[in-house]
Amino acid sequence: MPPFLATRNDFLASLSVRARRLIPWNYPTQIYLETTERCNLRCIMCGRTYSERHKAGEGVGDMPLATVRKLAPLYRRATQVTAQGFGEPFLHPEMPAILRFLKERGATVTLNTNGSLLDEDVCRTLVEREVDRLVFSIDSPDPETYRRIRVGARLEDVVANIERLNRLRARSRSGKPRLALEFVAMAMNFGQLPALADFAQRHKFDEMIVTNLFKHGDPGYNTFYQKNQLGALDPRQAEAAWAEFLRAMERHGIPCASPFHYGGLRQFLRAEGTREPVESARRMDARMQLLGFIDHPPLSAAVDDRFPVSGWALGVGGVPEAEIRVEGVNQVLLRRRAQLGRPRPDVPPLLPPEFPKEPNCGLLETLDVSGLEPGIYTLRLLARANSRAPWTDLSPVPIAVKAAGRFAMYCTQPWSTIYVTWNGIVRTCCFSVQPFGDLNQQSFEEIWRGPAYRAFRRAVIEGKVAAGCAECLSGKSAQNHIRPLRAWLKFGR
């Protein structure tokens, strides 16, 4: 149960979002302190590996303890303080002092680490300071694959460090820190997920996180991304590996958080690559019995209360039954049968040879979403060969819904979250590149309530996608750390 101040602050944050407050009633509920921007590894999926600035070691450093102290009144009010950003936290020479200060100020502390630097002293600090959660980044249970991904580290050394930490926390009264294993899913390691579930159980992890690759602006990184994103996998093999992994996790009793849960893995297998219908159809597995695509609205588009949906669907047996759905995180909010039959002569030439040359497989429907709250939803096209067959999800598309007279607010982090770089610059998250102030020159109150933050919140309310936000949205990871107000009202009764 979170402390009272954090619980109250979380509630005020939900009210601030619902009221579209430009100056929130709350303080941040999530605080990220980039304690260092230095790292001892060169991981192949990390943007810093491809950054010329990081290669040259320019503009990187450690956060002074004095900067950590400037935010002291905030820590007790936050539900989580993550003392790590774009670097390896245990490179910071003052990390024990930082952890001591955060815990003395009542912070709930999380750290992310590659695990290569956890010697005896570091492990004792983590246990004695009762750090709440430690997340290990481990992308393969196979030492050779791990070495190829986490360049500069050996899995055998990291495992030895995990076992050292487990011995110490077994002797402590609190049992802290709670251990989490984070896995970045790529084409080269996805099939190893079932074995990683056994690895997590063997080494006493309490939870697991499976996440996806993110797009970045660097051309070198994007070359890597195109080769390793999940769209490069055989969909059936990937779904089989995911199902086997989930069964293993259930068997071991280890919870797993992943965006792959939200609508299933299939949207990542089909949507991570290009959304051009020609290329999408050519990339799809020829063994699939049903193919389809939503042409409009485009990915992450902002839509009004009523908007057109166009696309097509076709099966090896001819024109199938089709359905359009609008979903929240884990709930179908709108379902409508789609009428296929509009002329689409552009489609048959794109399909595998076993599909019929049927041009009348298009659809054009108008959806009414006036009953939905403004926010991010998933629009889906599903099809089935007949009424007894299961539905196949063909083309999921994230959309931002604008209700009448209101706006499509696609993220709540400008009300809930701050990311402080090692040199004191305040941003709203690790993706955002917009600075809102400098703790070396301004107080936090001046930044949090200042004109730059207010202007950014207004832009998000209006659905204007800022620099950095598009990458997050395309990765389907728009964040909402705030509990819905309805849940609070229900709790109050």
Image (spheres, helix red, strand yellow):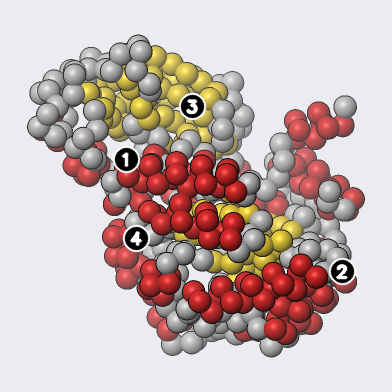
Instruction: Where is residue 77? Give x, y as percent.
Output: 83, 57
Please give the count of numbered marks on the rendered protein: 4
Q: Secondary structure at mark 3?
A: strand
Say which of marks 4 and 2 sits in front: 4
Which residue is located at x 69 percent, y 69 percent?
166
Q: N-terminal of the two: label 1 or label 4? A: 4
Q: Secondary structure at mark 1?
A: helix
Task: Kindly identify which residue carries mark 2.
Answer: 105
Residue 188 shows which numbered tag? 4
Say which of marks 3 and 1 sits in front: 1
Give the alpha-carbon distance from disc 2 to disc 3, as whole Å.
Answer: 44 Å
Q: N-terminal of the two: label 2 or label 3? A: 2
Kindly tell me whether residue 44 is visible in this rendering.
no
Task: Kindly identify which residue carries mark 3.
Answer: 326
Which residue is located at x 55 percent, y 23 percent?
333
Question: Marks 4 and 1: in contact by CB < 8 Å?
Answer: no
Q: N-terminal of the two: label 4 or label 2? A: 2
* 84 and 181: which is toward the camera: 181
Give the alpha-carbon distance from disc 3 to disc 1, as whole Å.
Answer: 25 Å
